[in-house]
Amino acid sequence: METIHGFQQLTASEKERIHRAVLRILAEIGVKIESNRILDRLVDFGADVNRTTQVARFPQALIERFIGESEPAAERVAEPRVECSVGIYIGKYLNPRTNQFEDWTEDRMASYVKTAKAMPNVTGIGTLGCPVPAPHRIHPLHVKYLCWKLGIDMDQGIQSLELCPFIEEFHGLRAEALGMPLKESMRGTMFLISPLKLAATDAEQFLYFAERGYPCSISNMTTLGGSGPITLAGALAQHLAEDIFCNILQRLYYGTRTLNFLCSILPLDMRRAAYCYGRPENAVANLLHGQMARFYGAQHVGQTGLADAKQPGSEAAAQKMLTVIPSLLYFNAATINAGLLSGDEVCSPIQLIIDDELADALNRLGRRESFDDEHLAFETIRAVGAGGGFIGADHTAAHVRTALWKAPLFSHSGFHFWQSKDGTSLEDRARRRWEEIMAGPDPAPGMDEATEQKVKALLDRALKTLERT
């Protein structure tokens, strides 16, 4: 049953209008796919394919049948939950010691991972692209080596067809070392070139994985007024059409029966052509997209918890909460992209620590209260009586550690106490926490020395091979 809220609630007729627009996009405009092999599969699926333009159009009845034959996605857990996901991107590292935007090094990347692993609400640490200096032609391979070495989620970027055999060999080494099947280690991901196009290079990379049985997902990104219409309604319809196309490929090549939609609909700053991540439109797009995902019985993942702010602090926190809280209220789940600033251009250990505290506070907000006799505390209220106090009550002592949220960083004292005893800002307290983490033991490495030598030899061989081509 869908919860009714006071804002951005789609009516049944609005959902139907959006759905009809999606069907028309797929049937009348279609998707350009620069791969004859994929077009062949789509012909068998029932699409109308123009070989000259390489455009596949999908009759409305075909899409209706595809959706109707899909299995409904599993419901998310009932208790609201905010998680922190830590991403490391090509960009800058905001050094807490110097407050300078610095280029990534392997040591800085390791210290950032160390900070993330110390945060209790962080559920995943990963990368997108190779942030540290490395030969350009083996970037996708080098970053996978760093992920394994640092013990974080494996980067799933492909980027280069010529590197795919070496990526496969790398994952063979990893699967052997970790005792897992190769198909569980080797995974790829890529994005459509929106609007409505799967480019030749991406198609070939997808086929390399799919035809060998390695999982590879294709997602989409839409910018308002850039790669999609400037109106949210138009961008949503186009984005949903691309969602459905991506799911068609997953069913044709992997037999996936559920629908999985990822919402990445961003405003485009029209004066500077910059992506914007901390605007109200991001939150509205997530709410609309999530409701349509429910309409289709699809799993919805929204892009939440990002900021355009360039420095850690109140602006960044406010922008992240602008997208996190509405998604949490509507869908019982949201993610904070902890530590990221300026979209994904800057990684800040201080913001990472602040974001983890924000997630902890929101999870207390979503925690279900108990209303049993013990928590209703009638006997304690009677024992204290009218005009009494509860500070010294046994009931208070029994529940004080669980009833009240602990604020490690947020201010929790009166002004005069703070002024005389502390006087620090939130950023100061987060920096102090970071210093404590840095002084502590390092996490265990993800690979042993012998395995690292094998991987380095593979990187060297891959670079020499590619340089000869």
Image: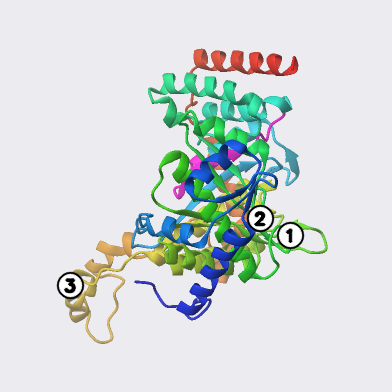
Residue 388 visible in the current orientation: yes
Q: Nearer the viewer, residue 398 or 202?
A: 202
Q: CA distance from mark 2 to mark 3?
A: 44 Å
Marks 1 and 3: CB-CB under 8 Å?
no
Dot in front, 1 or 3: 1
The x and y percentages for residue 153 are 50, 36
The span shown in magenta is 115-134
Amino acid type for the residue under numbered disc 3: Asp
Quadrant of the rendered image containing residue 381: bottom left
Residue 84, numbered label = none
- Give residue 226's mark: 1
Provide the secondary structure element on which disc 2 rests: loop
> Who's the residue at 71% across and 42% down the image?
91
Tell me the quadrant of the picture where the C terminus can be found.
Answer: top right
- Say if 278 sits above or below 378 in the image: above
User: In the rendered image, is residue 405 in sight?
Assistant: no
Residue indicated by mark 3:
373
In the image, which is nearer the foreground, mark 2 or mark 1? Answer: 1
Looking at the rendered structure, the secondary structure element under dot 1 is: loop
- Asked whether 435 falls inside the magenta stretch, the response is no
Q: Amino acid at mark 2?
A: Pro
Mark 2 lies on residue: 312
